[in-house]
Each structure stands twice: as C-alpha cells, then as structure tokens.
Image (cartoon, rainbow, N blue to C red):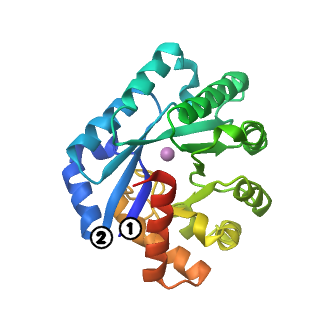
Amino acid sequence: MFIDTHAHLQDALKIRLDEVIQNAKLNNVQKIICASYDLSSSYDAVNISTKYEGVFVAIGVHPENCEEYNDEIEQKLEKLCENKKVIAIGEIGLDYHYTKQNKDVQKQVFIRQIKLADRLNLPVVIHTRDAIGDTLEIVEKYKQYFRHGGVFHCFHGSIEVLNKIIKLGFYVSYGGAITFSNANSLREVVKATPVERLLTETDCPYMAPVPLRGTENEPKNIPIIAQKISEIKNIEINNLEKILEENTKKIYKI
Ligand code: NI
C-alpha cells in the first residue's frame, strides 16, 4: 500500500471527504496522516479519524499560529492524545517566511511541543521555512527529547542540512515539489536521502504534483510522487512501496 504521511483534510477537502478517501483507496493509498496546525484543526482531524479507519492524526500548533499557544491549549492537546488515532505531534517548527517579528515566541512554542511529544511518547512532525539555521540549532540542542523520533516534512533543504538531520535520526518526507520542472537540486537531495529514512506525503490540498499542478491536491496522488522517487533512486516501484510502508510503520507505528 501507499501512505500519505502528511495531508490536510480539515479544510478545502472536508466538503467532499467521502470522495477523497475513496479516490485514495482506488489508488492504493490506504493510510493517511491528517496533520494539524492549531487547536481547532486538531479537534477536526481527530473527528475525521473516528469516521475513516485509515486516517490517523498529528496534532499541534504550526509556527504561524504560535501566538495562540498557552498552558490551556497544551492541556487540551495532551487530552486529545488519549485518542489512539493520534500518532504524532505536528506540524510544529519555525517559519520566518511571512514574519520574523515573533522568532522568540515561535522558538518557545516549538520547544514546548517537542517536550510535549516526548512526554506523550510520540514522534514530531517538523515544518521549517526560511528558518533552517534556528531549526537545526533547536533539534540539536534538544535531541534528548526525540526518543520517539521525528520527521522533516516537505523537506527542501540542502544536502548538507539533510546529512545533519539524518545523523540526528530524523526521517525525511517529500511531496509534489520533487516533480516540479525547476526542482533539479531538490531531486539531488532526494537522491542523497538514505532509502530507509524516506517518506511520502502530499501536503494536500496544496502542492499538487506534475502533471496535476494547479488542481486541488489529494492523497490519491501519492503514487505519482512515489513513482518520481523510484526514478530518482532507481528502485523498482513495488520494492519502494514496501520500503515506504515499512519506514512509516517504524516512525509512526501505523
Ligand atoms: Ni502541511
């Protein structure tokens, strides 16, 4: 089976979720991890997972929403983790693309959720954008809190950064961006990623792969991304499918 390890089913796709899940199954995408970005999307994701057997959940507060994070929200997240479908904390991290004004808050909230994941015995899903230096500094400094591992989602860093996060034990997830015509350097990074650390994701509804760019992305597109990885790494697709499934099982226990 194929697995979408990072999908946002809470918003645009929510209005036609039966169809989206059915499309995924028809394309052999049997498991989907629904990633959250604030408290409300975390509740939403858990609700969706109770309705669809193959849907699992990552809950957490994205750096863009870091200002809302407080003790009360943390307690609510902790309570939500009693649900067996919650298998990770994410997406969390640093994003300086839209604002650099609240770097300290972003860092604090990132670190708090790293510690939360450790307390709850869960892996973390890391989002980093225009902030790789500070992200690396934090994951290196707090590496004792990653007993249950973590994933850099939608990775687009350099080979040098890749080597550092691989050494720290992280998994690396790739999405539709690896199919884009201007993504040669990213494909070199995929090529350099050890196969036992690879994961696939859509990050839907964004980032539809070629040749579907401009359409609403869905978990059903995972085989297109896997096919691209199979070409880049020169691994036969059926073999890669098994490896990706095994990797997902190891990090997310699903
Ligand atoms: Ni995402």
Q: Circle 1 is placed at which residue position?
A: 2
Of the 4 image quadrants, the one containing the N terminus is bottom left
Residue 125 at what x, y percent from top left?
55, 45
Give whichever of 216, 5 is nearer the camera: 5
- Residues 51 and 179: in front is 51
> Could you tell me residue 103's position as x and y percent?
72, 26
Tell me what residue is drawn at x 34 percent, y 38 percent: 45
- Residue at 49%, 33% in the rendered image: 60
Give the amino acid at mark 1. Phe
Left or right: 195 as drawn, with respect to 13 = right
Vertical relation: 228 (above or below) 142 = below
Disc 2 residue type (three-letter): Asn
Residue 244, numbered circle? none
Q: Quadrant of residue 85?
A: top left
The earlier-in-sequence mark between 1 and 2 is 1
Report whether residue 210 is seen: no
Residue under the image location 76 percent in, 63 percent down: 159
Residue 151 coordinates in the image, percent (x, y)? 58, 51
Classify 10 Å Cα crowding around label 2: few (below 14), some (14-19), many (20 and above).
some
Dot 1 alpha-carbon crowd within 10 angstroms: few under 14, some 14 to 19, many 20 or more: many
Query: SS at mark 2?
Result: loop
Asked if one can make out residue 155 in the rendered structure from this viewpoint, the answer is: yes
**With respect to residue 115, does 53 lie above or below?**
below
Q: Is residue 115 left or right of residue 208?
A: right
For the C terminus, the quadrant is: bottom left
Q: Which residue is mark 2?
A: 27
Quadrant housing residue 24: bottom left
Alpha-carbon span between mark 1 and mark 2? 8 Å
Q: Nearer the viewer, mark 1 or mark 2?
A: 1
How many numbered marks appear?
Answer: 2
- Residue 48 pos. (x, y %): 27, 41
| Secondary structure of the residue carrying numbered label 1 | strand
